[in-house]
Every structure is written in C-alpha cells, then in structure tokens.
Amino acid sequence: MRLYSAFATVGGLSMVSRVLGFLRDILIAAVLGTGMIADAFVVAFRMPNLFRRLFAEGAFNAAFVPLFAKRLEADGNGSAHAFAEEALAGLFAVLLLVTAIAQIAMPWLVLGLAPGFATEPEKLDLATALTRIAFPYLMCMSLVALLSGLLNSLHRYMAAAAAPIVLNAVLVAVMLIAHWRGYHNDPAAGYLLVWGVFAAGILQLAMLWIAAKRAGFALRLRLPRMTEGVRRLLALGIPGLIAGGITQINIVVGTIIASLEASAVSYLYYADRLYQLPLGIVGVAIGVVLLPDLSRHLGAGNHTAAMDSQNRSMELALLLTLPAAVALLVAAEPIIRVLFERGAFTHDDTQATAWALAAFAIGLPAFVLIKVLQPGFFAHEDTKTPMRYAGVNLVLNAAGSIILFFGFKAAGFMPHVGIALATSIAAWVNAVMLWGTLKHRGHFIIDNRLARNVPLIALASVLMGAGVIVAGIVLEPWMRTGAGLMVQASGLAALVTFGVVLFATVILATGVMTPAQLKRKVRR
C-alpha cells in the first residue's frame, strides 16, 4: 500500500534524524549541563523554531498543501508551478520583514519568551546574542517547509524527510569540536551551537531547492502580488498559523513559566527531546503523508479512499504510540540516566528530567492524534475549526501550567512537572474535540477494523508496561549510575528489546496483526 510505504520512508528517515538528535542532545548535556549556557541556548534555538512552526509548518501545511494538491490534480503542473511561485514570493517577503523586526526587538522578544531571565542580566545578554545569530534559521526553514509541501504533494518524500538529518549532523560535529576545545559550560560552546544552526539552515534549503528542481519545479523568486491564489492562501493560512503551531505555542507557554525556576527550562527541553522521538517519527510522518494524500483523494472525489486513509493512519498511530507512551512513563528514569547522566548532567538532573518526561508521556498519544486528525479539516479547506480548538487548548494549557506550577511548588514538589502535565491534559482535550467534530460532520467514521483493534492495542500496551517494570528491576544493576556507558547502553537496549518483543507477541496473539502482515510491514 503506497500510504504505508510513504509512512515508512518519512518515519525511517525521521528515525535516523532522531537518533542523531539524541547523540546531539547527549553531547549538549555533557558539555553544557543544565546551567546558564544551556538555558540561554534553549531559548535561542526555540525562538526561530517557534516562528518556523507557526509561519511554515503551521500555516503552509494547513493552507499551501491542499491548494497546491488541488491545482496539481485539477489543472496540472503548470498551474501548480505558478501558484507555488506566488506563495514563495509572499512568504519570502513576510520572512524578510519578520527577521528585520526581530533583530531590532530581540531583547524584548527574549524577555517575552523567558521573563525569568530579567533577574540574571548575564543570562539575558547571552540569550539575546545567541538568538540574533540563530534567528535567520527561520527564513531558511520556512522556505524548506514550502518546498517540502510541494515535494510531498508530488509523492516525493525522501528529500524533505532527510533535511533534519543535516541539522543534527552539523550540531553533532559542532559539539564534538566544543568538547575537543574544552568548552565545557562555556559561552563559546553556545556560540558554536548557534552558528551551527545558521549553517545547517542554509544547507537544508540548498538540498530541498535542488530536489524541487529535479522534480521539475525550479521556482523563481518573483515580486509578491495579491493574486486570487494568494488571497485564498492567506484566508486558510492565518487560522492555520494558530492551529498548526499549537504544540509550539504550548511549549513557549511552558518556557515562559519555567524560566521562573532555575534549570527548569533545561529539564523540560531534555524531556521534550525524548517524547518528541515517537511524536516525530509517527505523528509527523503521518501528518506529512496524510494531508497531501487526503487532499488528492478529495480533489478526485474519492471519499471512500479518503476515509480508509484516515482509519489506517489512526490505527498505525495508536499501534506505535500507545506502547511508546507507556514505556516512557514507566521507564523514564533509566532512559534519562543512560542517555544523559554524565559530565555536567548530574543525578539530580536525571530525577527532575525523568518526572517531566513521565508527565509528557501521558499526553503523547494525544499529541500524535492531533497530527492525524487535523489533516481531516485542512484537506476540506477548514482551518478555522482547528484554530478555535487550538485557542481552547492554549487557554487550558496556560491556566493549567500556572496552577500546577505554583501548586506543585507550594507542595514542595518539582514545579516544572506541573507544566508538562498541563500540556498533556490540554492535548487530550484538543484531540477529543477534533475527533468529535470530524465524527459529527461525517468526515471520519471509525470502521470495524479500527473499532476492534484499538482496545486490543491498549491491552497489549498495558501488559508490555507491566513487563517493562519487572524487567527494569532485573536489569537495574546494569543501568545504575557508575556502571559504565557500554554496560548501561546494553541494559537499556535489553529493556527496550524485551518491551518490543512482549508487545509484538500480544499483538500477534490477539489478532491485531497476523504474522504475514507484520512481515510485509517490516519489509516495507
């Protein structure tokens, strides 16, 4: 099935990127730890990423892909090519303006993202300087997002999915240089990192531009014009700006509140990197493939195929995400310890980060379901409904983060865990609202196969979680602090392997998947 093949392509390359990302974060944790330099870099890196996901991945995935796919399906390559150039011209003009304003207003932007830095002038100055260098990454990656949507609509997924590998490879190289030069917990390491981000953005843009040219879509930069296509893009893109970027908005809310507590920004960053692994591999892969697939099916009037794509996407999402969420919940501490606890990253840092990871894990299935459900609205050119639900999500997350942060702090517990828990709760509310509306409109009807398999997947995940708890006790001597990196890695690998085998055994025993189906999917 072409849909599963596309999921495998995007998910497989995302896996490579995430593995490199883990190596990158392991090196960052060892070199920077969770102190002032780490906090400043996290804010500097998060700023362009926020705008990238709002302007590019949010607005353009929500608006550009359905409109481009419809033109491609109905009018052919010529019309689609012209529309892509119109969109490129408008996006580039906006990005130039935003980048110029941001460079001037950077101290206030950094304070807006991390108001707690106001009491530490040295940290604020460093974060501002680092963010100014990293911010042009926004321009490169927003253009990369447009080219990615174009290529995905042409069913050319490889180049776009491989682009993040470039960023992680560059930052791994930069951190190895920092370690070699002895820049441990030193501002020089922060500067090396942000210049690496800047360089990686240029390399990614060049790679996607070449891929689009080879696909027959060598885009020229025109003067921006308010054409009918651009008007429609704006009408869909402005609500998509909020709806598609809700996860990033919630992360920013968490960063603002976390900046009030020393090292909390770093704890949430490292925990976020862990739960982003399944979210990036499963949720992003499905979202990237599903939106152009649905758009082209609906453009051709094939509603049966569109409904089947949604059901199979949700089934695959839950099959891969539920066990991952349970595993991260019950094994958060050994995972954090083995991956990060070395150099400047201490045992106390492990405890604080593990609790945040467990809280994020509760919401992981919801984060992925949002990626699965939103394309059902975007493909019907409805970005306003997800925008309204994103607004509800934002209010719930902000209120919950404030209440739980100060509530946990008053109770003597780690306050940053309240931020992660509030983010998870808000994500579940958002996912339920999206699903309920699609069901009410008749745009997503659960078929018999999905209705049968979801409870069985949940059962298999719970049994796997219980098994991982027991196995974790047995393997604890291998994964404890001071056991040595290779011994720890072997223990964690054994724990993960045991969980995967146990889950697969229950899935096969309950008939969710037959051995022949499993063999075909593994081969793909």
Image (cartoon, rainbow, N blue to C red):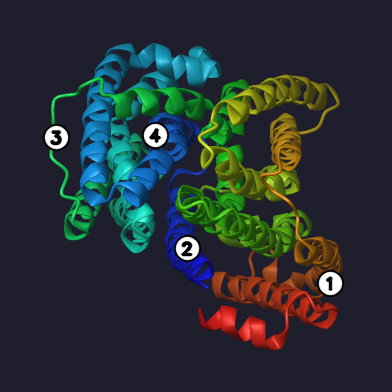
CA distance separating discs 2 and 1? 25 Å
Q: Nearer the viewer, residue 141 or 154?
A: 154
Drawn side of residue 81 relative to residue 293, left or right: left
| Residue type beneath disc 2 | Val
Q: Nearer the viewer, residue 333 or 461?
A: 461
Q: Residue 26 location, x and y as percent?
A: 49, 55
| Residue type beneath disc 3 | Leu
Q: Disc 4 marks which residue?
A: 52
Q: Residue 352 location, x and y as percent?
A: 69, 42
Q: Disc 1 marks which residue?
A: 467
- Report which quarter residue 27 is drawn in: bottom left
Asked if 144 appears above or below 491 in the picture, the reply is: above
Q: Nearer the viewer, residue 25 or 516?
A: 516
Asked if 120 appears above or below 36 in the picture, the reply is: above
Q: Can residue 263 be seen?
A: no
Q: Nearer the viewer, mark 2 or mark 3?
A: 3
Q: Nearer the viewer, mark 4 or mark 2?
A: 4
| Residue type beneath disc 1 | Gly
Asked if 325 appears above or below 502 in the picture, the reply is: above
